[in-house]
Amino acid sequence: MSDNFTAIREVSTNVWTFSRPFARFGILPVGGRSTVIKLSNGGVWVLASTALNPETKAKIDELGPVQYIISADAVHHLFLGEFKKAYPTAKLLAPAAAVARADKTLVFDGVWGRDPPDTKYGFEEDIQACYFSGFKNKDVAFFHPASATMIEADLLFNLPCTEQYSKTKSSGALPLIGGFGPSSWLHRKFAASMGEDRAAMKRDVKTVADWDFHRIIPCHGDVLETGGKKAWLAAYGMYLDSASTK
């Protein structure tokens, strides 16, 4: 059923976002976002974090055949089943922690945290991935070099979620604090608290820091169109020595 709440936008050539309202615990507006990339082979890669409503499906079908359906972390698995039902030939990939929580009828073609670290899934010519084994939510960060874009779920927030609430009567502002951005002390505290293995975090934070991106597409909050690398270092610099941040 259509609800007209999804803001669909081409943020860069062949990169589309599907932004929707979502409130954590039904109270805190954090927004939700799926991201779709048209690959160089004509196929479509989907980070599936929102419902596959008619507007979303129509745009995805316009872009090309879906080849990959991705869950970015342990808690972004709720819509995998409906995407897989709509696109049964697409490969389904998720972190092991998401597989453990997801619909048990789903068959996964790739599992970060279970497969060997150097496993290739077929989209690497267009998109790089970094699995954060030391992060509590077991996130995977993605890099699309053609658009200089990093895509992630719960590693970095950029609240308030103005775009995600743009088709509602709400501003999307967080109660009391208003915002939760990567340069805030609260976000730095969050990033430090979510790291369960410091050595692994140092490795993976540096991998992302070495990517050449300026845009970050988060699942929660507004897209950072510029200054993405600076935002990443502001949020996660505590895992890097000073030489790594230059």
Image (spheres, rainbow, N blue to C red):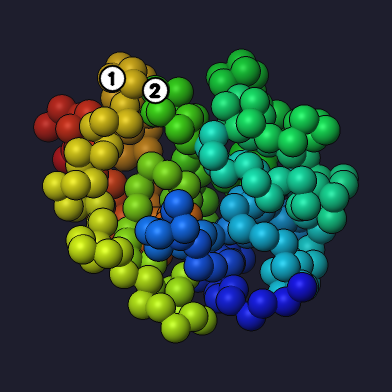
Q: How would you rate the neighbour count of disc 1 (Cα within 10 Å): few for under 14, some for 14-19, many for 20 or more?
A: some
Q: Is residue 200 above or below residue 98?
A: above
Q: Position of residue 149 (x, y in %)?
A: 45, 55
* Label number found at residue 217: none
In the picture, which quadrant includes the N terminus? bottom right
Task: For residue 67, say whether it is visible.
Answer: no
At mark 2, the secondary structure is loop
Q: Earlier in the sequence, mark 2 or mark 1?
A: 2
Q: Nearer the viewer, residue 74 or 123?
A: 74
Circle 2 sits on which residue? 134
Image point (26%, 31%), residue name = 193
Identity, as a three-letter code, of the amino acid under mark 1: Arg
Q: Is residue 220 above or below residue 131?
A: below
| Contact check, label 2 and label 1, Cβ < 8 Å | yes
Image point (59%, 53%), residue name = 49
Q: Position of residue 53 (x, y in %)?
A: 72, 68
Q: CA distance from mark 2 to mark 1?
A: 7 Å
Task: For residue 187, say whether it is visible.
Answer: yes
Identity, as a three-letter code, of the amino acid under mark 2: Gly
In the picture, which quadrant includes the C terminus? top left
* Left/right of residue 41 with respect to residue 25 in the rendered view: right
* Label number found at residue 198: 1
Q: Is residue 180 above or below residue 70?
A: below
Q: Position of residue 153 (x, y in %)?
A: 47, 47
Q: Position of residue 117 (x, y in %)?
A: 56, 19
